[in-house]
Amino acid sequence: MSKRVVVDPITRIEGHLRAEVVVGDDGVVEDAFVSSTLWRGLEVIAKGRDPRNIPLLMQRICGVCTYSHYLKSTMAVEDALGIKIPLNAELVRTLMNAALFLHDHVIHFYHLHGVDWVDIVSALSADEEKASKLAFKYTDSPIATGANDLKKVKETVAKFAKNPQGLGPFANAYWGHPTYHMSPEQNLIALSHYLKALEMQRMAAQMLAIFGGKQPHPQSLVVGGVSCVMDILDPSRMGEYMVKFKKMADFVNNAYIADIKMAAEVFATEGSVVKPMGVKNFMAYKDFMVGRDQYLFDSGYILDADITKVFDIDEDLITEEATHSWYADDEALHPYDGKTNPNYTGFVDGESVGPDGKMIHSKLIDENAKYSWIKSPRYDGKPMEVGPLACLLVNYAKGNKIVQDSVNGFLKATGLPVGALFTTLGRTAARALQCQIIADNALVAFNNLIENLKVDQETCAPYVIDKDKEYKGRGMGDVPRGMLSHWIRIKNGVCENYQAVVPSTWNASPKDAKGQHGPYEADLIGLKIADLSQPLEIIRIIHSYDPCIACAVHVMDTKGNQLSEYKVDPLYGGCSI
């Protein structure tokens, strides 16, 4: 008899997400439903506002992806007004973007996703001398893996273990789960890098703040360009960025990539991570200008995991629908015409597997009704996966030599077949490879900025907003979690309509009118779960997408109660939402 397994909330993500699966007697997932349980209202807040202020509001969609939304929202207004920003501004934006990617991908693997692969308790029994020698198997220049370093790591975590509250930040996990496969020494190496990554993420945030003023919520982007003129003309500020960048690049190449190779070796036969994914359509958008009309990554999409064919994106074929989303308007609409009218219908009574394996009363998803605050984006009616894996697959198919060399080198080093890319393991590896490509190539933008400043110091383009004209525009590109697009209509000098179609909306979308599951849901179907009371396999797959559900939703009270009230002086252009 089929049983329901509910994971709510899924932790170690940004925002609130629930996964619910139907499992047969054999422990295999028969159907899956993913629900975002809080509502986003930023599109509504944008209406009627001066379009130049909207990017500052839109970066408040999320506390992690602040720069991503800030940039694409600014680009949307610039596209609407027909503004071509100066090259210096483009390159500065790229350097800020590089800092964000390095920051985001490192945090994701070590602090959000890493413990899905690494058994912390096992690391406490490791032989640090043996582990130190083992680290050289995965890189010629290991980081934080000397015997003394590893001994200190064990002592630090052992202190957590002796605490009455248990393992501190590592508490309440499924340690000893049968799908953990690393040796104690391998677990200790990765644990050491987990702690080292705490230092590195601070450094990456400082890199972005050099040009952004602060991080999160930088303030140096303006419609038309950037405002950090004094920073890019200051050799000490530029030098500070370069030094920090090189330290981050070293960590990416000799810790992050090394650990991914180690994980690929150990998990190559683990069914829950090499199970073929459910949605095999991938889409990515051009990003990372490193020189005049020179980008690291290009646009396109592929279908059915066929990397022999890549197609150009027709933006008119992008739609969002709400058949199974808590909105009043179900029809598939282009983002320029999108509607955001909430219609919450809640959950139904039922039973699910409890933490002790017994059935307990639960509030469950009604899969025949509405069950998520996330809409269902589709391209030409098809679900698409977006993210680093999509970026690499599209660019591999388009003959991008940098990407091809990176992917081929990884497959050769690990002995994995090309088919391994289309798995949870492949998705996790792709994020690391994208991070490495940026670490190895983004300083091209830095050097081109230095050269261009010698002959041109322009950082912002002039423009006017004619209140008698109507405008529409979009800002599109790939951000750490995939293809992000912001869409705006401007009328009478203010925003008439606004929509943000974010990566986690593409990936976490519920079923559409045709019954097609989004990538999260489709990826869970067919998954074998070893222990229904410890569904690590579900969490590992969902985490591989790096969910950022704050980008897909915001807050409401289901009983209609007022949460709080704010008074804002409109002269200051908005507030933090």
Image: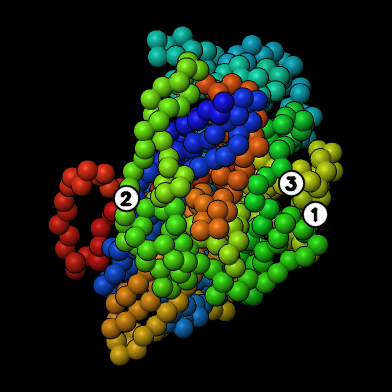
- Residue located farthest toward the front when viewing the structure as drawn: 1
Q: Nearer the viewer, residue 193 or 325?
A: 325
Q: Are marks 3 and 1 in contact (CB under 8 Å)?
A: no
Image coordinates of residue 431 in percent, x first then y, are 64, 47
Q: How is the image coloured?
A: rainbow
Q: Nearer the viewer, residue 185 or 327?
A: 327
What label does residue 382 carry, if any? none
Q: What amino acid is labelled 1 in the image?
A: Asp
Residue denoted by label 3: 421
Image coordinates of residue 426 in percent, x first then y, are 70, 43
Is 533 rendered above or below residue 251? Answer: above
Q: What amino acid is labelled 3 in the image?
A: Leu
Q: Secondary structure at mark 1?
A: helix
The answer to which image quadrant residue 58 occupies is bottom left
Q: Secondary structure at mark 3?
A: helix
Q: Is residue 252 visible?
A: no
Residue denoted by label 1: 405
Crowding near the residue tagged with mark 2, few <14, some 14–19, many ≥20 C-alpha atoms within 10 Å = some
Left or right, residue 18 beside residue 51: right
Left or right, residue 193 beside residue 159: right
Residue sitting at x 56%, y 71%: 317
Residue sitting at x 38%, y 43%: 37
What label does residue 344 carry, if any? 2
Q: Earlier in the sequence, mark 3 or mark 1?
A: 1
Q: Nearer the viewer, residue 66 or 131?
A: 66
